């Protein structure tokens, strides 16, 4: 294919509908499988959250039955309802993955749409992997083309770009041709949106669910013949001008299928259930404490020198709620030091009231120094941290960490991804059923129908 000229939407639609599964490298398919397994795990955990309960209750009230699993529900839902419910659940604890091609939470939106349509049409798990890759690559290509201007303006990229990935994955599973895929993408772009004001509230998870639902709805509408704007990206009143200040790197789109965004920049799998902006700092502080065998009681101050985007995202210095705690650098560091690790069991009001956590939070501050003005830093350390830890005797230790453990540059081993899945799902399913589901999901990217993988491990209690 040639570089996009008149219509970026048409170019993406042609690529998405015409891609052969054999053209996807095995390494990319493996990464897609990891993303799907991780997202299913965090969605099962998130199904118990208040936001997910709200979403399921609304879906159940609608009364529409279907063929798709909504984790935490007692019956099957329509594809769009399942996408909304599971998208909300997947992002509820902010434990889902991230991609720096657009600063976006991709899988929490794309995976629920893919699973919902995949179950509806009884797709093979291999077709599901292909569709997930298509949705991810299209979303990340547009994210990369935005050059992060979108995110820096205050738009929440998961809400804006998420419907695109969900829509393209669903369109691929529905086997839409290039014209209908283009219509679906136009519909998704025309109605997209999301603002970072949602951070620290249930709106953030619910909007991830709505983004997944929107992608499914737009693909289904195009499947039935609905039209969408053909130039929704480059129109004077389209995506580039309205959302992105006219900034758009067409070469990022032209590279699709040659550069695989699931590999570069890759996807970051989270190790702890809080905003990724805090992770590098948490890892750096934890390493200092472990390496130097520090007594936490002897720590006087922890100064985190971080990029402006980290300070903007982590806006709660003394969080009052669990939602706010997920966007608090002091909480992420204090809870990690106080409890040894920050897992889902510590993400509660009791931890916020813990005297040790409260005391440690007051010792953590953030600043943004001149090091972040260097042109190389946004790519090298998009959410990195330089830590200066001062002890009560006046001595201090310093360390710099560019990316967190679990990032594409420092990925979690498969054993830790599996451990995370079980830690997320076992409290909901029980250990035996969680282990059975994980074993079943190992057969993703095979001829086995997706329905068999989700239902075969006795997950009926989640439907």
Image: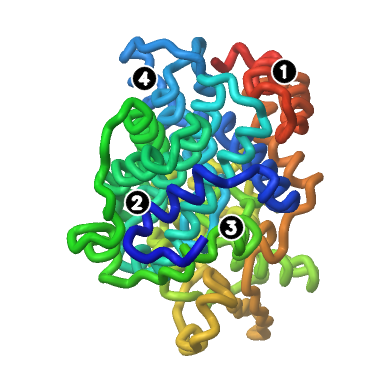
User: Which tag, 4 or 3, sits closer to the chain's start?
Assistant: 4
Disc 3 residue crowd, few under 14, some 14–19, many 20+, Cα 10 Å: some
Q: Pick the residue in front: 16 or 102.
A: 16
Residue at mark 4 to residue at mark 3: CA–CA distance? 37 Å
Q: Secondary structure at mark 1?
A: loop
Residue at mark 4 to residue at mark 2: CA–CA distance? 23 Å
Callout in the foreground (4, 2): 2
- Dots 4 and 1: beta carbons under 8 Å? no
Q: Secondary structure at mark 3?
A: loop
Residue appearing at x 50%, y 26% in the figure: 116
Residue 309 visible in the current orientation = yes
In the rendered image, which residue does mark 4 sit on? Answer: 59
In the rendered image, which residue does mark 3 sit on? Answer: 257
User: Which tag, 4 or 1, sits closer to the chain's start?
Assistant: 4
Q: Is residue 121 left or right of residue 149?
A: right
In the rendered image, which residue does mark 2 sit on? Answer: 160
In the rendered image, which residue does mark 1 sit on? Answer: 457
């Amino acid at each position: 294919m040639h570089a996009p000229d008149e219509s970026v939407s048409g170019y993406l639609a042609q690529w998405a509908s015409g891609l052969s599964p054999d053209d996807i490298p095995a390494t990319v398919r493996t990464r897609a499988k990891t993303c799907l397994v991780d997202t299913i795990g965090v969605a099962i955990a998130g199904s118990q959250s208040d936001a997910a309960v709200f979403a399921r209750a609304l879906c159940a009230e609608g009364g529409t039955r279907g063929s798709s699993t909504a984790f935490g529900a007692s019956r099957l839902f329509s594809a769009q309802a399942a996408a909304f419910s599971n998208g909300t659940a997947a992002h509820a604890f902010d434990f889902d993955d991230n991609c720096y091609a657009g600063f976006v939470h991709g899988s929490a939106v794309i995976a629920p749409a893919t699973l919902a349509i995949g179950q509806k049409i009884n797709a093979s798990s291999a077709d599901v992997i292909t569709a997930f890759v298509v949705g991810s690559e299209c979303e990340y290509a547009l994210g990369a083309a935005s050059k992060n201007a979108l995110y820096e303006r205050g738009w929440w990229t998961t809400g804006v770009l998420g419907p695109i990935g969900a829509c393209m994955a669903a369109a691929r599973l529905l086997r839409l041709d290039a014209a209908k895929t283009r219509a679906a993408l136009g519909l998704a772009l025309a109605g997209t949106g999301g603002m970072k004001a949602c951070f620290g509230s249930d709106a953030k998870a619910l909007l991830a669910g709505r983004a997944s639902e929107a992608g499914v709805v737009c693909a289904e509408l195009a499947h039935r013949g609905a039209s969408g704007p053909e130039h929704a990206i480059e129109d004077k009143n389209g995506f580039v001008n309205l959302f992105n200040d006219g900034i758009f790197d067409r070469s990022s789109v032209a590279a699709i299928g040659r550069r695989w965004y699931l590999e570069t920049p890759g996807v970051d799998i989270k190790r702890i259930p809080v905003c990724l902006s805090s992770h590098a700092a948490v890892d750096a502080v934890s390493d200092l404490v472990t390496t130097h065998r520090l007594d936490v009681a002897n720590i006087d101050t922890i100064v985190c020198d971080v990029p402006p985007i980290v300070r903007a995202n982590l806006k709660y210095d003394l969080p009052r709620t669990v939602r706010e705690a997920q966007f608090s650098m002091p909480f992420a560091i204090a809870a990690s030091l106080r409890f040894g690790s920050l897992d889902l069991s510590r993400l509660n009001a009791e931890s916020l009231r813990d005297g040790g956590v409260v005391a440690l939070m007051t010792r953590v501050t953030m600043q943004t120094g001149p090091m972040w003005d260097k042109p190389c830093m946004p790519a090298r350390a998009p959410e990195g941290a330089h830590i200066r830890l001062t002890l009560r005797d006046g001595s201090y230790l310093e360390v710099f960490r560019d990316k967190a453990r679990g990032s594409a540059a420092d990925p979690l081993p498969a054993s830790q991804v599996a451990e995370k899945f079980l830690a997320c799902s076992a409290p909901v399913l029980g250990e035996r059923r969680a282990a059975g589901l994980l074993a079943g999901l190992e057969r993703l990217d095979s001829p086995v129908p997706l329905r068999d993988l989700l239902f075969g491990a006795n997950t009926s209690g989640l439907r």
